[in-house]
């Protein structure tokens, strides 16, 4: 599993806060949907997606690449689902806001994942050239 090394110039606090914030809003929205309308699908989807986004922020804080991959996967599912609801209802909150925040989370997580993979590959290339020089 790819684990991030030292400081690679990206402030991980941004993706940690973004994933935790979007996850918390999604979790709370599912709970509110259940309490207000008795919607079990809202509770299940909100707690699953929200909980997974919160989990991804924890994994990112532990410098594990799987956190960004999980975050981008579940944020894209959230964006797709809320985007469909936004197009049907034209309501800004919650579907419009969650679509926007989910899309932002996808971009940030993908950027960090690609950067970490590229960094891991370039570190591997440096190690191979060091071995050849010996």
Image: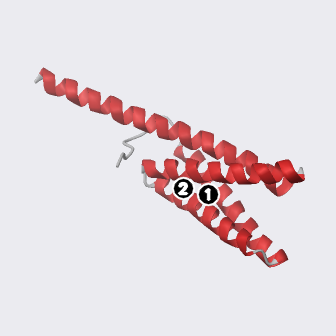
- Is 50 placed above or below 85 here? below
Q: Quadrant of residue 34?
A: bottom right
Left/right of residue 20 with respect to residue 123 in the rendered view: right
Q: Measure the alpha-carbon separation of dots 2 and 1.
A: 6 Å
Residue ID for mark 1: 20
Relative vertical location of residue 134 with respect to residue 20 in this rendering, above or below: above
The part of the image, by quadrant, that contains residue 41 is: bottom right
Locate residue 46 relative to residue 32 in the image: left or right: left
Residue nearest the observer in this picture, 45 or 93: 45
- Kindly identify the residue that appears in the image at 23 percent across and 30 percent down: 127
Q: Is residue 129 visible?
A: yes
Q: Which of 102/44 is in front?
A: 44
Crowd band around label 2 with a 10 angstrom C-alpha radius: few (<14), some (14–19), many (20+): many
Image-based side of 121 in relation to 22, left or right: left
The residue wearing badge 2 is: 57
User: Earlier along the polypeptide chain: callout 2 or callout 1?
Assistant: 1
Mark 2–mark 1 contact, CB under 8 Å? yes
- Residue 50: give x, y in percent of width and height: 64, 62
Q: Is residue 37 above or below residue 8?
A: below
């Amino acid at each position: 599993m790819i684990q991030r090394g030292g400081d690679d110039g990206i402030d991980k606090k941004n993706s940690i806060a973004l994933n935790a914030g979007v996850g918390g809003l999604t979790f709370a929205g599912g709970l509110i949907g259940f309490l207000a309308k008795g919607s079990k699908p809202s509770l299940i989807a909100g707690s699953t997606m929200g909980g997974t986004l919160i989990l991804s922020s924890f994994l990112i804080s532990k410098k594990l690449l799987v956190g960004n991959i999980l975050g981008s996967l579940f944020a894209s599912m959230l964006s797709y689902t809320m985007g469909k609801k936004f197009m049907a209802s034209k309501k800004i909150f919650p579907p419009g806001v969650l679509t926007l925040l989910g899309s932002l989370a996808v971009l940030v997580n993908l950027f960090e994942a690609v950067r970490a993979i590229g960094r891991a590959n370039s570190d591997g290339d440096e190690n191979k050239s060091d071995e050849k020089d010996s």
